[in-house]
Amino acid sequence: MFKDYEEYLTKYDIEIFENELTDKEYNTYLNKYSNKYKVKRQKFFYKGEMQTDNIRCIICKYGSIQPNTTKNNTLLFEWVFATANKGTFWIKQKPDYCVITQGSNKEGVLIFPESKLIEDKERLEAFFQIRKRKRLSDEQKKVLSDRMKALNLLGKNKDD
């Protein structure tokens, strides 16, 4: 467990770069995960004003994962809980490489290395409760296709 943010940065050789991401990079950075996880566009507000639109985030049960820096390959997770008890229980289960940079029991931000999303995938998916994309089998696609064809035929018959 890290005592503070500085110790975390030192261990993982992370430097903080201000304003390193352009809007285009920021908006499209998480597209590489869109085949596996639910990725949604969200609006980004800073001090009550909308800074940019359509930021892509990986959707989780209690928040979203967003890029923090690309040079250091770190991601951030913003969380919001309905109760402080739920947040306290959740925080106690966090992996050692995740560091809370700001927050309370109900809401906050933590950062973690992007490489851990691949290396320690099962643990992070369970911890963040990442929403996965639904995959349809070939049989399910065929059933849906047949239903759509049947609906189209019904619609043509009504017009006659």
Image (spheres, helix red, strand yellow):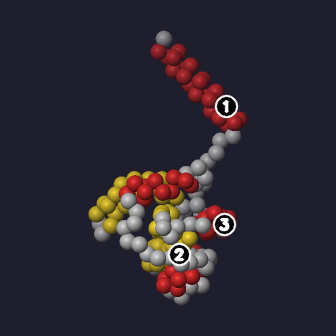
Left or right for 134, reference 157: right
Q: Nearer the viewer, residue 143 or 95?
A: 95
Q: Which one is in front in this view, the residue at disc 1 or the one at disc 3?
A: 3
Give the label, 1 or 2, closer to the camera: 1
Residue 110 percent coordinates (x, y) = 50, 74
Amino acid type of the residue that numbered disc 3 sits on in the rendered structure: Glu
| Residue 154: quarter of image | top right
Please tell me how many numbered marks the rendered image carries.
3
Q: CA distance from mark 3 to mark 2?
A: 25 Å
Q: Residue 87 shows which numbered tag?
A: 2
- Horizontal and vertical percent position of residue 34: 55, 51
At x 49%, y 83%, the residue is 5
Q: Which residue is mark 1?
A: 142
Q: Earlier in the sequence, mark 1 or mark 2?
A: 2
Residue 40 in the image, given as x and y percentages of width and height: 48, 53
Name the mark nearer the viewer: 3 or 2.
Answer: 3
Q: Which residue occupies 57% across, 82% down? A: 11
Task: Classify mark 3: residues with Cα within 10 Å, few (<14), some (14-19) or many (20+).
Answer: few
Which of marks 2 and 3 precedes in the sequence?
Answer: 2
Q: Secondary structure at mark 1?
A: helix
Circle on res. 119: 3
- Relative to 52, 70 lies left or right: right
